[in-house]
Amino acid sequence: MNQPVILLGSGGHAKVLLDSLRRREFDVLGVVDPARTKGDDWLGCTVLGGDAAVEAYLPDRVVLVNGLGSLPRDQGGRSRVWQHFHSKGYRFLTLVHPAALLADDVALAEGVQVMAGAIIQAGTVIAKSCIVNTGAIVEHDCRIGHSVHIAPGAVLCGGVTLGDAVHVGAGATLIQDIRVGAGSIIGAGSVVTRDVAARQIVYPARSQIQDLLR
Ligand SMILES: CC(C)(COP(=O)(O)OP(=O)(O)OC[C@H]1O[C@@H](n2cnc3c(N)ncnc32)[C@H](O)[C@@H]1OP(=O)(O)O)[C@@H](O)C(=O)NCCC(=O)NCCS
C-alpha cells in the first residue's frame, strides 16, 4: 500500500508529476503552494495552503513530492524545499513514470523523478533529488550526483559521471565516459566530447539563419 502523497508546487513540473502519480495510483492528499488559495481546486487536487500546511501531517504518515522544477540558473527553490522539509523529518517520494524503462539494477536515491519515456540502463546510480526528464536516455554505468536535472531528450552515453547540481540541457549529448564537474550547465543541443570542470557553462553551435537565395 502506497503512503498518501502531498505535492509541493503547482507549476508545469508539478503538473507532469501529478499525471505520473495518478497513473501509479497514488493517493494525492493535495497540493501545497503559498501562491494559491487554500481550499481551491487545482487540476482535481485540493490546495492545502502554504508550506505550513504540510505540518498538519506527521512525517511518517505522508510522503512528499517536490514539484518545483529546476532551471539551469535557478535550482534554488527546489533545494530549499528539500532542505526545509528534510530537516523536519519528512521524506520525498522516488517516482518513476510507468512508461519509463529502467534496467533491474539501476539505483535511484530518495526523491529521484523519472519522467515518461526515459530510459536508464544497467549499472547506473542516481543520487537524491535528481530529475531524469521526458525521453532522456541515461546509458549503462553512469554516475549521477544529487540535484542533477537531465532535461528532455538529453542523451548520456555509457560511463558518464555528473557532479552535483549539474544541468544537462534538452537534447544535449554527452559521449561515453565524459565527466562533468558540480554545478556546470550543458546548454540545450550541445555535443560534449571533452570533460567539463565544475561551474562551467557549455554553449553549443548555433543555427545560422539567412535569406534563401534562389
Ligand atoms: C545554455 C543556456 C543556459 C544559456 O543561457 P544564457 O547564458 O542565459 O544565454 P542567453 O539566453 O543569454 O543567450 C546568449 C546567446 O547564446 C544563444 N544560446 C543560448 N543557449 C543556446 C543554445 N542552447 N543553443 C544555441 N544557442 C544558444 C542565444 O541565442 C544568445 O544568442 P545572441 O547573443 O545571438 O542573442 C541556455 O540557453 C540553455 O541551453 N538552457 C537549457 C534549457 C533547458 O534544458 N531547458 C529544459 C527545461 S525542462
Image (tube, rainbow, N blue to C red):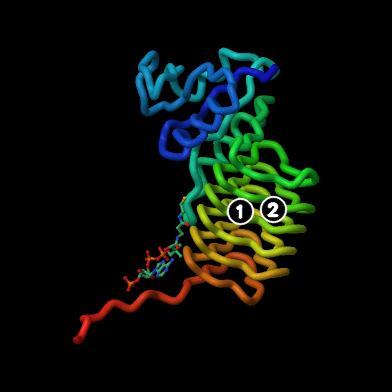
* The N terminus: image quadrant: top right
Q: Nearer the viewer, residue 18 or 99?
A: 99
* The C terminus: image quadrant: bottom left
Q: Mark 1 vs mark 2: which is more N-terminal? A: 2
Q: Is 107 above or below relative to 32?
A: below
Disc number for residue 165: 1
Q: Is 161 above or below relative to 109?
A: below
Q: Nearer the viewer, residue 23 or 48?
A: 23
Residue 99 locus on image (x, y percent):
59, 39
Query: Residue, x 54% and y 51% (percent of image)?
Result: 135
Q: Is 46 above or below relative to 195?
A: above
Query: Residue, x 68% and y 50% (percent of image)?
Result: 120
Q: Residue furthest bottom?
A: 214
- The three-letter amino acid code for the residue at tag 2 is Gly
- The three-letter amino acid code for the residue at tag 1 is Ala
- Where does ligand 1 appear, by image quarter? bottom left
Disc number for residue 145: 2
Label 2 CB less than 8 angstroms from ligand 1: no
How far separated are the C-alphas under marks 1 and 2?
7 Å
Label 1 CB less than 8 angstroms from ligand 1: no
Q: Residues within 10 Å of mark 2 (few under 14, many from 20)?
A: many
Instruction: Report if the CB atoms under discs 1 and 2 are less than 8 Å apart.
Output: yes
Question: On the rendered structure, is 4 left or right of 203?
Answer: right
Q: Nearer the viewer, residue 35 or 27?
A: 27
